[in-house]
Amino acid sequence: MIGGCRGIGKAIALRLAADGFDLAATCRKKGPDSEALEQEIAALGRKCSILELDVCDREKAGKTLAEAFGQNAPDVVIYNSGITKDNLFVFMDNTEWDSVLDTNLRGFYNTVQPLLFGMLAKRSGRIVVISSASGQTGQAGQVNYSASKAGLIGAVKALAREVGRKGILVNAVAPGVIETEMTRELPKDQILPLIPLHRTGKAEEVAGAVSFLCGPDSSYIHGQVLAVNGGLVI
């Protein structure tokens, strides 16, 4: 699981552990968050290994993943790494653009592509990419973020056409406004009227969608975007 120690990623990791999966979860730097995840997954009776890697560093990320998996392709790959650096496009600087695209989109290639050959050889597996409602409809002040998340949706649809015949299912989950550190400072009084359910979502609700896409009941769902947004994008 790429990006699995905090927020939505942690909720997904715990849900998959509860579903019976052993996990390898990545983080930029091991610390209290990764230690807590290991302990909580162990309490569920599953194994969890923490991999330190920067998704923007293609060479080191590939090496870390190769060392961790060797010839054993994972059954499921979740890409959840993402950052925001919001600004109006006219004022957006190079760093705000590059860092978001590098992490959210380029990181997908750097970490998922090295694992794909083994999955193809095994002729089975699931790939689930965490996109965003912003990638479905676009948001003012988020041209960089929306571009990166829309790019992931395009990548999912194209990759699904490439690997479906090999038994690998590829889908995306597009969360709306979910209660995490990333959304803590958002003006909820302005956002809630735009959401038909009139509430923000929980990370566990996103995790439930991922669990479904990784389980037996989704075996004929491929190349799709499952929206978890309370009706924000319809």
Image: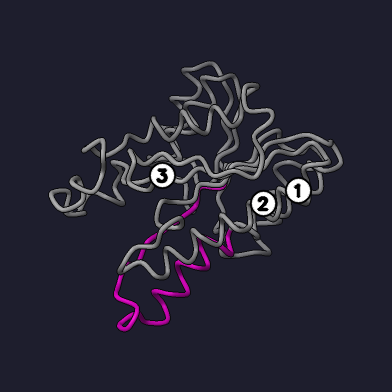
Which element carries disc 1, helix, strand or loop? helix
> Which badge, 3 or 1, comes first in the chain's sequence?
1
Residues in magenta, as a range: 79-107
Q: Which residue is mark 2?
A: 112
Please rate how many residues cluster around mark 2, counting C-alpha atoms within 10 Å: few if below 14, some from 14 to 19, many from 20.
many
Instruction: Estimate the spatial distance between the alpha carbons at disc 3 and disc 1, rounded to whole Å.
Output: 25 Å
Q: Is residue 216 left or right of residue 90?
A: right
Q: Residues within 10 Å of mark 3 (few under 14, many from 20)?
A: many
Q: Inspect the image, locate mark 2, and give the three-letter code of the amino acid beneath it.
A: Val
Which residue is labeled 1 in the image?
116
Q: Spatial distance from mark 1 to mark 2, Cα to Cα?
A: 6 Å
The type of residue carrying mark 1 is: Leu
177 is higher (above) or lower (below) than 216 = below
Q: Where in the figure is residue 179, as x and y percent of width and height?
A: 28, 41
- Quick one: label 3 or label 2, which is nearer the N terminus? 2
SS at mark 2?
A: helix
The reply to whether discs 3 and 1 touch (Cβ–Cβ < 8 Å) is: no
The span from disc 3 to disc 2 (Cα, nearest Å) is 20 Å
Q: Which residue is mark 3?
A: 175
Residue 206 colored in magenta in the image: no
- In x, y percent, where is residue 119? 78, 41
What quarter of the picture does the N terminus occupy? top right
